[in-house]
Amino acid sequence: MASRIVLSQLKRVSTLRTSTIPQAMNYTPKRTLLSKNYIWANRMKAQQTTSLLGRQQVRTMFIQTEQTPNDDSLKFIPGVSVLGSGSAEFLDVRSSMKSPLAKQLFHIDGIAGVFFGPDFITISKEESAEWQLMKPDIYAAIMDHFASGQPIVYDADDLAANDTAIHPDDSEEVQMIKELLDTRIRPSIQEDGGDIEYCGFENGIVQLKLKGSCRGCDSSAITLKNGIENMLMHYIPEVQGVEQVIDETEEIALQEFDKLEKKLGEK
C-alpha cells in the first residue's frame, strides 16, 4: 500500500513537471531590484577580475637591466614603449614634478637622475648608494606606473625631441650636423643608456649636451672627441671641433668636486 502511494506521488510530480515545462520555457523573469543588483554585482566582479588580471600581467612584466659605461647609471628596459620618440631628463625632485614616474623614482633614496628614452629608462644614483638595495624599489615603481595607466610625462612639449628637427632657416652645415646626430650618432649613444642634445653651431664648433648615463661619465670626453667629433669632421669639413655644454647645476657640482679633490690632495 505504501509503495502504491509513493508511485502515485511520483507520477503526480512527473505530470506536474511536464505540464510546467512549456510555461517555464515561455516565462520571462521580471527585472526586480534584486535582479538588477545581482547583475550589477556580477558586472562589477567581472570588471574587478579583468582589472586585477591586467594589473597582475603588468606586475609580472619582465624588466631587463643593462650596464652602462657609467658605474653610477643603469639602463632599465621594461619591454614596452616608454616615450616612443624623443627623450626627457630629470635631475632633481623639482623637475620630476613634470613626470609621475620620475616623481615616484625620486622617492627612492640614492636616486640622482632619471632619463627616459624611446624604450628604456636610465637611472643614475649617488656615488655612495648601492644598486642591490635600490633595485627592488625601482622595479616596483616602474611596474606600478605602467599598471596605473598614467602618462610618462604630463606635457609632451617638455620632451627634447625637436633639438635635431631641421628648420627652414638652418644652413646646409647645420642640417647635415643634425642629420648625422639623429641617424648615426644618437642610436649608438642610446644603446649605452644616454643621449645627446644639439645646442648650436658657432665658429666651426658644435655645441652638444650629454644626457642620461653619459652625464658625468668618465669616458664622456672620449665619446665626444674620438667618436662624435671625428665623425662630424669627417663628413662636414666646416666642423672644427665639438664642445660640451654643461648645465649650471652640473657646473656647480664639478666645482665642488674640484674643491674636494684639492683638499684631499693637500692632506
Image: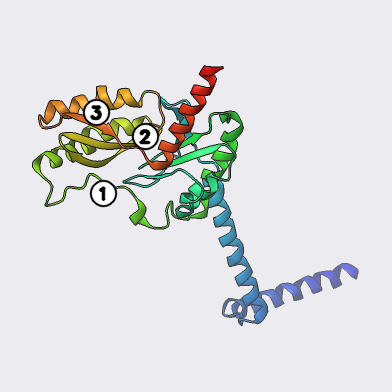
- Residue density around tag 1, few if under 14, some if 14–19, many if 20 or more, within 10 Å: few
The residue drawn where x is 12% and y is 52% is 168
Task: List the residue tagged with mark 1.
Answer: 162
Q: Secondary structure at mark 2?
A: strand
Q: Would you say the residues marked 1 and 2 are in contact, meaning their CB atoms lie under 8 Å apart?
A: no
Q: Nearer the viewer, residue 238 or 31?
A: 238
**Looking at the image, is 231 positioned above or below residue 52?**
above
Task: List the residue tagged with mark 3.
Answer: 228
Q: How far apart are the alpha carbons under marks 3 and 1?
A: 19 Å
- The N terminus sits in image quarter: bottom right
The residue drawn where x is 52% and y is 46% is 58
Q: Position of residue 263 (x, y in %)?
A: 53, 23
Left or right of 217 in this view: 166: left
Task: List the residue tagged with mark 2.
Answer: 194
Could one spot residue 172 in this view of the protein?
Answer: yes
Q: Residue furthest right?
A: 1
Q: Amino acid at mark 3?
A: Ile
The earlier-in-sequence mark between 2 and 3 is 2
The quarter of the displayed image where residue 226 is located:
top left
Q: How far apart are the alpha carbons under marks 2 and 3?
A: 14 Å
Left or right of 267 in this view: 164: left
Q: How far apart are the alpha carbons under marks 1 and 2?
A: 17 Å
- Residue density around tag 3, few if under 14, some if 14–19, many if 20 or more, within 10 Å: many
- Residue density around tag 2, few if under 14, some if 14–19, many if 20 or more, within 10 Å: many
- The C terminus sits in image quarter: top right
Q: Nearer the viewer, residue 243 or 185?
A: 243
Q: Secondary structure at mark 1?
A: loop
Q: Position of residue 102 (x, y in %)?
A: 49, 47
The residue drawn where x is 29% and y is 30% is 188
Left or right of 73 in this view: 190: left
The quarter of the displayed image where residue 254 is located:
top left
